[in-house]
Image (cartoon, rainbow, N blue to C red):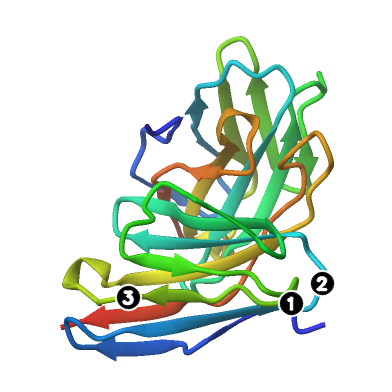
Amino acid sequence: AQTVTQSQPEMSVQEAETVTLSCTYDTSESNYYLFWYKQPPSRQMILVIRQEAYKQQNATENRFSVNFQKAAKSFSLKISDSQLGDTAMYFCAFPQGGSEKLVFGKGMKLTVNP
Amino acid sequence: NAGVTQTPKFQVLKTGQSMTLQCAQDMNHEYMSWYRQDPGMGLRLIHYSVGAGITDQGEVPNGYNVSRSTTEDFPLRLLSAAPSQTSVYFCASSYLTPGQGFSYEQYFGPGTRLTVT
């Protein structure tokens, strides 16, 4: 069963705008990691950011940050100052049941327009 | 380091043919996995391995076979290709933290686009 949900299949923004990508998941584990991956048109999968569930502080990597709401099981990705190179598919990923099975959401296509 | 390499990059098969997709990594990662990516479906786990000699099924294992005889290599075999196996296939590898399962990023290969006619 799918345990990671990305409800928005597609979004488009203008360059320099801020955009938030949503992701929800389901688990009974208390300690786990969450991931956002980016897949540009080149098809290469690239890690964007990682969040450890036991940490209160939201992870940040340059223009990318997360809003992690553990109780709500929500893990959204915020991209600030969007750039043309951010155009890509974005996938939320989560280890199913704390196991080694990494489950991906269905992805969201982000287009950044000039 | 070459990272994760996959061969071939493209392949066309006829229904019923068999073939092996190759995957190798030079990072001494314990964990290796195979995913397939289909439009609107995200990446779905086919098989994975937590070390040499150990493999397990993912979400969509039917029609695929794997083995892990070395740490470096994790080939994926299509036993009798079907049009439903037309997809892009990704191999990935990662470290494992004992007792914590997935804590590190997965390193992905460039993918293989397979078409079954």
Q: Is residue B4 something one can see in this rendering?
A: no
Q: Which numbered mark, 1 or 2, is in the foreground of this view?
A: 2
Farthest residue in the top direction? A71
Residue designated by label 2: B27
Considering the numbered disc 2 on the image, is that residue within a helix, a strand or a loop? loop
Q: Is residue A72 something one can see in this rendering?
A: yes
The amino acid beneath tag 3 is Leu
Residue drawn at x 33%, y 50% is B41
Q: Chain of mark 3?
A: B
Of B71 and B101, nearer the camera is B71
Q: Residue A65, located in which quarter of the rendered image? A: top right
Q: Chain of mark 1?
A: B
The amino acid beneath tag 2 is Met
Q: Indicate which disc, 2 or 3, sits on the residue closer to the N terminus.
A: 2
* 10 Å crowding of disc 3: few (<14), some (14-19), many (20+): some
The spot of residue A17 in percent (x, y) is 55, 45
Q: Is residue A111 left or right of residue B31?
A: left
Of A77 and B5, nearer the camera is B5
Residue drawn at x 58%, y 37% is A94
